[in-house]
Image (tube, helix red, strand yellow):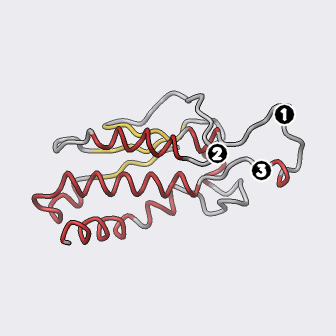
Amino acid sequence: MSFELDLRAFIEKAKGNADQVVKKVGIDMLANIVDRSPVGNPSLWQSTPPPGYVGGRFRGNWQVTFGAPATVELERIDANGSSTKAAGAAVIAAYQSGINSIWLTNTVPYAMALEFGHSSQAPAGMARVTAAEFQQFINKAVQELDR
């Protein structure tokens, strides 16, 4: 599961600060998606968890790439999301004009099920809800640059 940020749509609005706006929007959207991502809570499950289960694999598998979505699953388990956000922010910091898309991707096999309501913790999903707020992220980033 992934979605692509179409950067051309708002570069004109940002004018000379386009790179800063893109980076701010990308980092904020990633943080929002990671924070909205459910973490396995066996007390909510209909079945018992496997022995040694630790929640946070889905949250830890959000990846940031340029130009194309990530294709490999990570071994990172990150229940609070801080490592995932830091790793993504480091990638986004390398953004430069001319890069046409930033992908936020989660490659775990159950990502689509979670996005489409399998978890009571995120019944409306994570990526779809965040993508619907895209303009708000742009407006916030542009306003912060105006200060």
Residue 41 disc label: 3
Residue 50 disc label: 1
Image point (43%, 48%), residue name: 3
From the viewer's perspective, is the residue at label 1 or at label 2 nearer?
2
Whole-angstrom CA distance, mark 1 to mark 2, is 17 Å
Whole-angstrom CA distance, mark 1 to mark 3, is 12 Å
State which tag comes first along the sequence, 1 or 3: 3
Indicate left or right for 60 with 55 as reference: left
Q: Position of residue 18 (x, y in %)?
A: 17, 56
Q: Is residue 17 above or below residue 63?
A: below
Disc 1 residue crowd, few under 14, some 14–19, many 20+, Cα 10 Å:
few
Q: Is residue 35 above or below residue 74?
A: below
Task: Depth check: give the residue in front, 59 or 117.
Answer: 59
Q: Position of residue 115 (x, y in %)?
A: 60, 53
From the viewer's perspective, is the residue at label 3 or at label 2 nearer?
2
State which tag comes first along the sequence, 3 or 2: 3
Residue that lies at the very extreme toward the left in this rendered image: 16
Q: Amino acid at mark 2?
A: Ala
Image point (71%, 53%), residue name: 118
Image point (11%, 61%), residue name: 15
Residue 79 disc label: 2
Task: Depth check: give the residue in front, 113 or 57.
Answer: 57
Indicate left or right for 127 with 137 as reference: right
Whole-angstrom CA distance, mark 3 to mark 2, is 11 Å
Say whether marks 3 and 2 touch (CB < 8 Å). no
Secondary structure state at the residue bearing disc 3? loop
Q: Is residue 17 above or below residue 109?
A: below
Task: Depth check: give the residue in front, 36 or 130.
Answer: 36
